[in-house]
Amino acid sequence: MKNGTNSPRPSIESLGAFAGFIVEFLTKTLSASQLKYLLRHKKYLKEKLNEVFLLVENLPLYIEWEDFYEEMTLSQNIDLSQVVIPTKPTDGKWRLLIIMEGLTPNIVYDEMWPFKKLEYFNNDIDDRIISFRTPEKTSYAIWVRDQIGPDKEFDYSQTIAQLDPDMKVGITLLEMMVFEAKYFSENRKHLYGLTICSGSRTSNDKDDSIPSVETRDDGWIELGWYGPDSKTGIRRVL
């Protein structure tokens, strides 16, 4: 799966503009004595510059996700540069999902799912779902396993309610819908199987049913829900 972006090297002109911006900023920020101090302590200066330019490591991810959201929602000037990207897990293959501020399941379903789809929430998914994480106030990032099917690491002799009672382990419905949209935009095909979105619950049901996203054999994507006693289909997020 794609998880980054390829780009040509910057031109001399663009590097010059970047350097000019830095010089202008430092001219307004540093005093002559501060600049003299930094030049005398270049090891300290290098450490601080390394901290600043760690952002460069994540630039391909920011670019990829801003381009994706601009294409899918037809919005312009999307800025995800302030999203804190958590440390990437080292056990196996993982990929990043950035969930944009203000995004809801209804928006994804209506604007970002161009394929055959079916939902059982009376055309208002937002009103029927509560989740542990939401982008109501700010964008955020999570890591999910880079695979087309749900995780196999869990002991499915236990129920979903037992494995994820506080909705902190598994993917939310919105996150799974974004994952599906992103994967389809890259591959023109769907993620596989049934995912129980244990990071969410259906808000109006007394039995705490859990929303699901399923790829049916006929190629349709179906949004539904399963009871808390279900024993399959979690996707861990970190």
Image (spheres, rainbow, N blue to C red):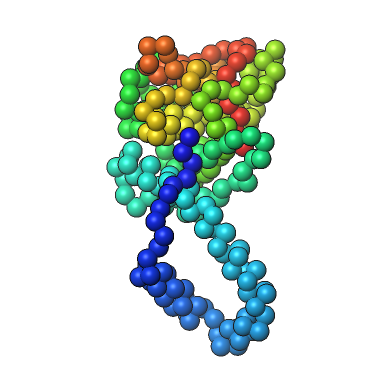
Quick check: 124 above or below 25?
above
Q: Nearer the viewer, residue 10 or 139?
A: 10
Whether 228 is drawn above or below 183: the answer is above
> Residue lying farthest front?
8
User: Front-most of 161 and 14?
Assistant: 14
Residue 35, percent across and down? 58, 83
Q: Residue furthest left?
A: 74
Taking the spot 38% from the left edge, 42% from the top edge, the residue there is 68
Q: Where is 223 relative to 33, above or below?
A: above
Residue 105, given in percent of the width and then of the height, sits at: 42, 30
Q: Give the percent coordinates (x, y) of residue 236.
A: 61, 29
Name the quadrant of the C terminus.
Answer: top right
Circle count: 0
Please tell me which residue lies in front, 205 or 10: 10
Examine the rendering and report whether any part of residue 206 can be seen.
no
- Res 110 → quadrant: top left
Q: Is residue 216 visible?
A: yes
Query: What residue is shown at x 46% (from left), y 78% (from top)?
Result: 23
**Residue drawn 38% across and 50% down?**
78
Residue 103 picture quarter: top left
Quadrant hosting residue 237: top right
**Residue 94: percent from left, percent from top:** 58, 36
Which residue is at a point 65% across and 68% down the rendered structure image?
47
